[in-house]
Amino acid sequence: MDRIVIVGGGSGGTVTANRLVEELDHEVDRGDVEITLVNETPFHVYKPIFLYVPFGEKELADARKPLVDLVDRRVELVYDRVTEIDTDGKSVRLSAGDSLDYDHLVVGTGAIPQPDKTPGLGEDGDGYHFYGPQASEDLRDALAEFEEGHLVLSVIGTPHVCPAAPVEFPMIADQWFRERGVREDIDITYTYPIQRLHGVKPTAEWMVPRFEERDIDTKTFFNVESVENGTIHTLEGKELDYDMLVGVPEFDPAPLIQEAGLGEDWMEVDRHTLESDHAEDVYGIGDVTNIPTSKAGSVAHYASGTVVSRIASRVRGQQPTANFHGKTICFIEAGTEEGTFIEFGYGRDPVVRDENKFLHWSKLGYNEAYWLTAKGVL
Amino acid sequence: MADELESLEAESAAIEDAADALLELQQDGTLDDLTEAATAVSLIADALDDEMVMAVASLANDLGMVADGATQTNTLRTLQTLMDAMDEADAFDDPQEVGMLGAVSKMRDDDVKRGLGFLLEFLGALGRQIERRAEAYDYE
């Protein structure tokens, strides 16, 4: 019997589990294949909802559903934390002390925000972020009381998840403040570490006139070194005062990636096969990997097709041939009424279309129907 | 001006292709249909708001979840069997009144025994599915 273990019940892990059952339908029903999904909690969390919470557009409850309602009943669900991956012995150890042996392992443990490691955020800082449930609610409460002063959205950590979110936040905030009638009393500044407004060049070019139109000030080549008493200090020797700081934090993979020898930092995989550079029969999916594209849910979704196909081929004793080409799609909200999207892949830049309300509605609609994506229906 | 002409020249092949496509649509009448249909799109754009879009998408999500579950191989054939059984045992065809003794007597019928067997299997599966949800729904 082939035992497939998936670690992580996020976008990548959940859709991979569902697609594996579908692809290996007969093998699973015959008892020749067993699929187990391990997640720390019984819930799947759709993190892009956190961007809407600070503006009162969504509640935290909108961001989560029980995994049991999203995952095929033939997938064994284990709610526990994986503490160790033994790639020689082909097993994963759980915090409860049990072990799960595997023949094929899929690692989708994601990117974990590290506000405490990020200047200006966490316990020692007064900055806010929106990359976690409590953090997005804290920001909502602070924004509700913010009626004048200088709001700075600073991309501090890179790489970060969801490439569009830092672009969207100041544009949504701009329109949201206008709707509240306080925009004239609030200055907004956006900072980015490199010499343009975004890592994806066409997105950066799209942003320039739109940020100018909205009177959003920008600072590039702005690498935050420290934050003290309402002032940001950068490696380049610049200073910027703020009344409210919203920072994009640093992100790290789970420590078990490094401990298992799967990567010195992010999990190192072949960018086309998604197979580990360091262990046999181990695949990486989603934000945890070092593949050269954005850390976005769509990447995990599209990559899952390759992982599923390659595992299914191996289960059937065939040579795997499926490859991943970096397909990524991200919506970009250009305020509260219009949006656009970007689609790109390895070595292929996106075309950024002009924003319109149909694409904004597509984003809102997708947020509602996301769960069908996790189920593998879409 | 020179720059604009240069830019137009660089795009001349694309402009020619676009004009050809438009001409074809105009000649076969499709363009008229598209122009009229565009007014319906305008109507939708004016009538919809964020809340309506989210409500429709949420409904589509829920229906999609049900449809996905209902079209699993086993579920689908079981639903078809149940629907055929409902059609055969028409509730409006004056069903007999059956008391306790009548029910016991019916138990000797092989078809009833098979149906009961299915119901007992179903109850077992239902219990397992409820149990599987215990931790997520916090009723352990």
Image (cartoon, coloured by chain):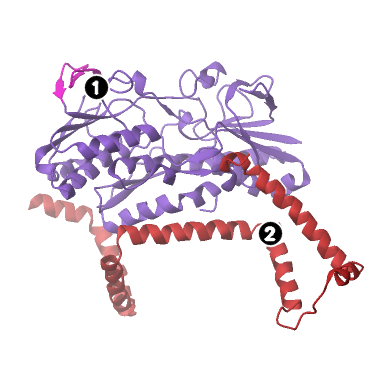
* The disc label shown at residue A223, or none: 1
Residue B104 placement (x, y as % from top left):
89, 67
Residue A244 placement (x, y as % from top left):
20, 30
Span of residues in magenta: A223-241
Question: Marks 2 and 1, how far apart in space?
Answer: 56 Å
Residue A148 seen in render: yes
- Residue on which disc 2 sits: B75
Mark 2, secondary structure of its residue: helix
* Residue B15, placed above or below residue A332: below
Q: Is residue A39 magenta?
A: no
Kindly identify the amino acid type of the residue bearing the numbered disc 1. Answer: Asn
- Nearer the observer, disc 2 or disc 1? 2
Indicate the colour of chain B. red
- Name which quarter of the figure residue B135 lies in: top right
Q: Is residue A240 magenta?
A: yes
Q: Is residue A269 left or right of residue A362?
A: right
Image quadrant where one finds the N terminus of chain A: top right
- Name which quarter of the figure residue B24 lies in: bottom left
Indicate the colour of chain A. purple
* The disc label shown at residue B74, or none: none
- Which secondary structure type mostly characterizes the magenta part of the structure? strand
Q: Are marks 2 and 1 on the same chain?
A: no
Kindly identify the amino acid type of the residue bearing the numbered disc 2. Answer: Thr
Q: Residue furthest left?
A: B1
- Label 1 environment density (alpha carbons within 10 Å; few <14, some 14–19, many ≥20): many
Chain label for disc 2: B
Residue B127 placement (x, y as % from top left):
71, 49
As rendered, which of A195 and B39 lies closer to the eye?
Answer: B39
Q: How many marks?
A: 2
Q: Residue at x 83, y 72 (%)?
A: B99
Labels 2 & 1 near each other (Cβ < 8 A): no
